[in-house]
Amino acid sequence: MPPEMAPLYPSPGSKNPDSPPCILHPARYNPRFWCSEGTIAMPKNKTHKGVAKRFKLTAKGKVKFKKSFAGHLMSGKSGNRKRHLRKPAFLSGAIAATIKRSLTT
């Protein structure tokens, strides 16, 4: 859709209803965003690479991650503490939903 056919909206922040309308961002009217029907395609969701390196999804959909404080200076920690730090931990609740949304493509 050429910019002259773009939908017009009132200028953001203007309190005057007679102010000239603004055109939506021209990047959205770039031909590579167009569908075959002439409509604008929605942008794709991309995986957040920082999250993908730190979290994994289990087969049941739980969010698994490695516990912190187990990278170095281990001689000052008890064996019981070190053994518990080796085991993976799982997230739950709202933060898990946010991480799942960042991981899905």
Image: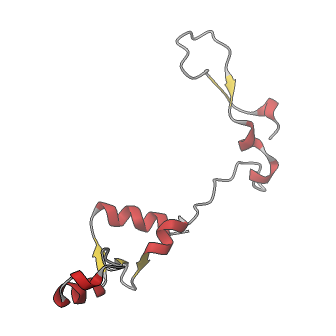
The quarter of the image holding the N terminus is top right
**Is residue 26 or residue 102 the one in the foreground?**
102
When the figure is inspected, residue 39 is found, relative to residue 73, above or below; the finding is above
**Is residue 63 or residue 39 the one in the foreground?**
63
The quarter of the image holding the C terminus is bottom right
Residue at the location (68% across, 24% down)? 22
Residue at the location (69% across, 31% down)? 7
Drawn side of residue 8 relative to residue 15, left or right: right
Residue 54 position in % (x across, y down): 44, 73
Quadrant of the rendered image containing residue 2? top right
Drawn side of residue 86 relative to residue 25, left or right: left
Residue 60 position in % (x across, y down): 36, 83
Residue at the location (56% across, 15% down)? 14
Residue 18 position in % (x across, y down): 62, 9
Drawn side of residue 78 relative to residue 13, left or right: left
Drawn side of residue 5 relative to residue 48, left or right: right
**Is residue 26 or residue 9 the one in the foreground?**
26
Number of disc labels: 0
Residue 71 position in % (x across, y down): 36, 79
